[in-house]
Image: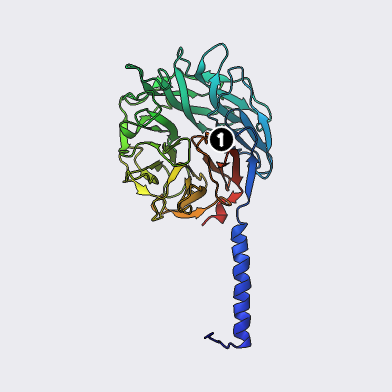
């Protein structure tokens, strides 16, 4: 029997108001972060994005193999162009923003007068990404392969300092005895015109098979006092090395952050390949956690094909690290993978984005989630940030990383989606004050 409930006119009015308010609130939440399609041309994947600290309306992004995207309206609209270099442009874009509206685009090479990926190329733009110089390079070492770099930039009014770290393969994908991989480092103190002689900063060799036993995923980060750390993953686990003189020399050892029993080369059903390579960042704000280093990665510690997103931190420049804690709080056996992290230099807030399948059930549908922390990475709130989900095709190369950056109150994630064989890249229009 249907139950009848009688209410006063005032009660009905209050309920009506609450109902309307709830609808409006849900609509606001649904529209809170507009999702922007940057491009679905030329099969884009492996993405990077940067915001000009002088004019946050100006943004530059990139994707494999040779695309550069520019925006002058904070990411609402984008221009799609091809990046050209005499050394060849062969993917792995890493874009950083410097002083005086400068941007730098680091990528792999395919030089006709050299060999495949034989150097790390740096191209600079002085006009917000509209034009780029011919470029310079670092890492050339005969026919050895130079791969999977990342960059940290210290901006300056006249000269930016650029720290770049990467993996050197004696020969990529070689199983030959004696062939090995190593982590390399180089610096530029003059806006990328010249780079220092590369240093080998890893002390334990990896193999060349681009898997768990390869040393890979090197990411530099800098403490407010100038102490430089570079972290990576390999057969010894998640490790780092440290420099106290702006990258001129490093310690004669690599230190352990934590073991990685599940390894960084993870298997995700429906993807050509996936990984949990680490990201290293440092809080450079004036907040209560200033100087805290964060290492974030994905790993299947259960060895049950259930990778999760992990994070730990150090408050003493790497001498000690907290125990790893899991960011994703779902109780499912779904995969989370390919994280990236940034820390606001204004607030010290930590943002982590990653691919997530907690809503997919038995399918391979994938969405983008974000974790946010206001308390130094001790607790994270989570939310799905992509408009929907997508279903990738294992025959299509999906890329190895996404990216997120934050500057001047703006937060801009960037990621790939793959609906069948159709690849596309996206961002969101997010402000720090809108994210609890």
Q: Label 1: state its secondary structure.
A: loop
Q: Nearer the viewer, residue 148 or 280?
A: 148
Q: Is residue 355 above or below residue 89?
A: below
Which residue is pictured at 39% across the width and 20% down the height? 174
Which residue is pictured at 50% across the width and 54% down the height? 383
Position of residue 205 in the picture relative to residue 99 (left or right)? left
Q: Nearer the viewer, residue 407 or 330?
A: 330
x, y percent for residue 4: 55, 87
Asked if residue 301 shows in the view, the reply is yes
Which residue is pictured at 48% across the width and 49% down the height? 363
Give the quadrant of residue 251: top left
x, y percent for residue 421: 58, 38
User: Which class describes the residues within 10 Å of circle 1: few (<14), some (14-19), or many (20+)?
Assistant: many
Give the quadrant of residue 199: top left
Q: Nearer the viewer, residue 196 or 385?
A: 385
x, y percent for residue 134: 62, 19
Asked if residue 283 shows in the view, the reply is no
Q: Nearer the viewer, residue 46 or 139?
A: 46
Quickly name the residue at label 1.
45
Count of marks placed on residues: 1
x, y percent for residue 367: 52, 48
Scheme of colours in the image: rainbow
């Amino acid at each position: 029997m249907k139950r009848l409930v009688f209410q006063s006119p005032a009660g009905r009015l209050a309920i009506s108001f609450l109902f309307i308010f709830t609808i409006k609130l849900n609509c606001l939440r649904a529209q809170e972060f507009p999702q922007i399609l940057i491009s679905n041309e030329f099969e884009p994947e492996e993405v990077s994005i940067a915001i000009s600290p002088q004019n946050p309306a100006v943004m530059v992004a990139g994707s494999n193999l040779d695309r550069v995207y520019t925006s002058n309206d904070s990411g609402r609209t984008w221009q799609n162009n091809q990046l050209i270099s005499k050394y060849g442009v062969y993917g792995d874009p890493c874009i950083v923003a410097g002083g005086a509206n400068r941007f730098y685009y680091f990528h792999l090479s395919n030089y006709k007068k050299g060999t495949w990926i034989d150097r790390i190329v740096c191209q600079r733009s002085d006009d917000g990404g509209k034009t780029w110089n011919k470029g310079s390079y670092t890492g050339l070492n005969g026919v050895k392969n130079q791969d999977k770099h990342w960059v940290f930039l210290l901006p300056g009014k006249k000269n930016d300092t650029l720290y770049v770290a990467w993996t050197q393969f004696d020969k990529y994908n070689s199983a030959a005895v004696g062939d090995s991989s190593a982590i390399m480092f180089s610096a530029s103190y003059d806006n990328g015109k010249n780079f220092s002689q590369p240093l080998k900063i890893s002390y334990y060799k990896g193999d060349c098979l681009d898997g768990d036993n390869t040393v890979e995923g090197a990411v530099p980060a800098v403490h407010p006092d100038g102490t430089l750390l570079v972290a990576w993953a390999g057969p010894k686990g998640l490790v780092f090395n440290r420099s106290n003189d702006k990258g001129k020399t490093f310690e004669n050892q690599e230190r352990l952050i934590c073991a990685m029993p599940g390894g960084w080369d993870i298997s995700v059903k429906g993807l050509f390949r996936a990984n949990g390579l680490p990201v290293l960042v440092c809080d450079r704000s004036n907040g209560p956690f200033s100087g805290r280093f964060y290492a974030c990665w994905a790993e299947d510690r259960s060895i049950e094909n259930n990778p999760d997103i992990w994070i730990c931190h150090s408050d003493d420049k790497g001498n000690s690290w907290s125990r790893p804690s899991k960011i994703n709080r779902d109780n499912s056996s779904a995969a989370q993978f390919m994280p990236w992290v940034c820390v606001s230099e204004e607030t010290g807030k930590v943002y982590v984005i990653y691919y997530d399948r907690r809503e997919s059930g038995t399918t391979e549908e994938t969405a983008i989630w974000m974790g946010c922390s206001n308390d130094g990475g001790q607790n994270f709130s989570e939310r799905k940030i992509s408009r929907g989900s997508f279903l990738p095709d294992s025959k299509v190369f999906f890329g190895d990383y996404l990216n997120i950056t934050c500057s001047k109150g703006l937060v801009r994630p960037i990621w790939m989606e793959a609906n069948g064989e159709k690849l596309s890249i996206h961002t969101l229009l997010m402000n720090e004050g809108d994210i609890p």
